[in-house]
Image: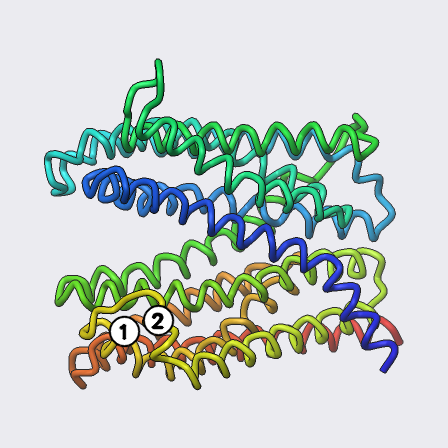
């Protein structure tokens, strides 16, 4: 019992600050929406369209950079001095940001052809242009945060995110509405505020790395290859999942705006609870990475199983709240009776989905630590695009279940997703047992 408690405490020591940081990122986005909505409906529409597209581009690079901590934890477990990987990590992040910047800029000429209202197109273009250059600050921050996480330094980076909620809101108000010599800029001002916030977060964390750690220079080999090998499948898995949820909103939105709104509301509900298993996943990836590098397989399995149990427990608590108080929780977001009537029956399906959603993200963290993310990518492609979307279309349209049909399909696919990853995890653990003999 004492042994189990040690692993719980060790994971929580890392996970709790990361939870604060994850919630902070959500609140930064909420701040953008609130300020945009108060400025004008056109401003809100412009940033909603722009962020829906730019986020899909940005998340590709973020997904790769988010494997830095797991890879460096493996190196640390092997006894390598990971202080010398700081400059290569920064170099890789800036190359990735340059690529993403060019891709984002390259999308701007196509905005005119997407059929958006003519009055918001200039604002969407401005947001795209500025966000393209914000990639450098954002990726610098992600790189530094992941680098520190490899050393299990998590408190300051996540407190910084909390502070930047307020910084971002202040800058949003300043540049969107104008003050003194600063003119009112609307959506363009919101983009400038986001750019400044990202650069501030990135530069502060870089300075903190220099202060906190003994940064060294030295030759490294195979690091970029590992980042691509582990990071690319992990990133593509994230993109596949992200696109899978968004395509449902698009398809159902063509039938009725109520369904699109309901889907977004339900995704918001599950994403709030999801932040805790996501933090546990990040902590487990580092712990599993270190023990994998050190070849301490018994501890590796204990961290993996403990993380999975913790995620299930957290999601079970969330499920109890949703199952007993669905109307109250939905009414926190809307008073629209039609929207409530659509959402409440799906909440009970969402309860089932959340358990497996918590499991799959923690399993993903385990495979990051094992430096084997191809199975995560393959599992996501099978689950979301081969199973969930086609099955959802059948249930939604042939069986007239509409949005409920898609969420039933998501539940089935989430079970399959976890099953595939569990099979491969047990197979990997079997090999560890053979090695230990």
* Residue found 27% across the figure and 31% down from its top: 186
Q: Position of residue 56 (x, y in %)?
A: 37, 47
Quarter holding the C terminus is bottom right
Q: Quick one: 421 or 127, which is closer to the camera?
A: 127
Q: Which label number is shown at residue 386?
A: 2
Q: Quick one: 132 or 16, which is closer to the camera?
A: 16
The residue most toward the top is: 181
User: Alpha-carbon neighbours of circle 2 within 10 Å: few (<14), some, or many (≥20)?
Assistant: few
Q: Say if 311 sits above or below 174 in the image.
A: below
At mark 1, the secondary structure is helix
Q: Say if 14 sits above or below 273 in the image.
A: above
Q: Position of residue 50 (x, y in %)?
A: 29, 40
What is the CA distance from the residue labelled 2 to the residue labelled 1?
A: 7 Å
Q: Which residue is mark 1?
A: 390
User: Alpha-carbon neighbours of circle 1 within 10 Å: few (<14), some, or many (≥20)?
Assistant: some
- 66 left or right of 357? right
- 429 left or right of 327? right
* Residue found 84% across the figure and 51% down from its top: 78
The reply to whether residue 324 is in sight is yes
Q: Position of residue 248 (x, y in %)?
A: 27, 65
At mark 2, the secondary structure is helix
The reply to whether residue 370 is in sight is no
Q: Position of residue 75 (x, y in %)?
A: 78, 47
Quarter holding the N terminus is bottom right
* Residue found 58% across the figure and 59% down from its top: 373
Task: Please report contact status of discs 2 and 1: CB closer than 8 Å, yes or no.
Answer: yes
């Amino acid at each position: 019992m004492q042994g189990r408690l040690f692993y719980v405490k060790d994971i929580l020591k890392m996970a709790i600050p990361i939870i604060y940081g994850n919630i902070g990122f959500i609140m930064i986005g909420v701040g953008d929406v609130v300020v945009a909505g108060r400025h004008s409906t056109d401003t809100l529409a412009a940033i909603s369209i722009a962020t829906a597209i730019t986020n899909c581009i940005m998340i590709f690079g973020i997904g790769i950079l988010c494997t830095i901590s797991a890879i460096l934890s493996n190196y640390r477990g092997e006894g390598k001095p990971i202080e010398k990987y700081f400059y290569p990590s920064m170099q890789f992040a800036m190359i990735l940001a340059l690529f993403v910047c060019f891709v984002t800029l390259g999308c701007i000429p196509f905005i005119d052809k997407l059929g958006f209202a003519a009055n918001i197109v200039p604002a969407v273009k401005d947001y795209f242009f500025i966000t393209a250059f914000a990639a450098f600050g954002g990726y610098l921050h992600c790189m530094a945060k992941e680098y520190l996480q490899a050393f299990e330094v998590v408190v300051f980076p996540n407190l910084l995110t909390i502070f930047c909620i307020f910084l971002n809101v202040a800058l949003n108000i300043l540049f969107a509405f104008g003050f003194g010599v600063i003119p009112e800029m609307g959506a363009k001002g919101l983009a400038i505020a986001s750019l400044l916030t990202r650069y501030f977060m990135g530069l502060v964390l870089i300075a903190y790395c220099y202060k906190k750690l003994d940064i060294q220079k030295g030759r490294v080999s195979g690091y970029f290859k590992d980042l691509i090998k582990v990071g690319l499948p992990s990133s593509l898995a994230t993109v596949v999942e992200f696109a899978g949820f968004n395509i449902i909103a698009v398809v159902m939105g063509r039938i009725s705006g109520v369904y699109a709104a309901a889907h977004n509301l339900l995704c918001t509900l599950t994403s709030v609870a999801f932040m805790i298993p996501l933090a546990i996943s990040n902590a487990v990836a580092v712990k599993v990475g270190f023990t994998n590098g050190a070849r301490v397989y018994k501890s590796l399995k204990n961290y993996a199983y403990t993380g999975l149990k913790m995620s299930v427990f957290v999601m079970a608590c969330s499920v109890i709240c949703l199952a007993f108080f669905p109307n109250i929780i939905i009414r926190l977001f809307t008073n629209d009776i039609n929207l409530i009537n659509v959402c409440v029956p799906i909440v009970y399906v969402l309860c089932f989905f959340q358990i497996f959603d918590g499991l799959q993200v923690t399993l993903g963290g385990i495979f990051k630590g094992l430096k084997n993310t191809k199975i995560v990518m393959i599992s996501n492609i099978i689950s979301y695009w081969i199973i969930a979307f086609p099955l959802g279309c059948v249930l939604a349209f042939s069986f007239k279940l509409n949005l409920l049909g898609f969420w039933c399909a998501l539940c089935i696919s989430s079970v399959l997703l976890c099953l595939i990853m569990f099979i491969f995890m047990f197979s990997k653990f079997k090999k560890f047992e053979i090695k230990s003999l």
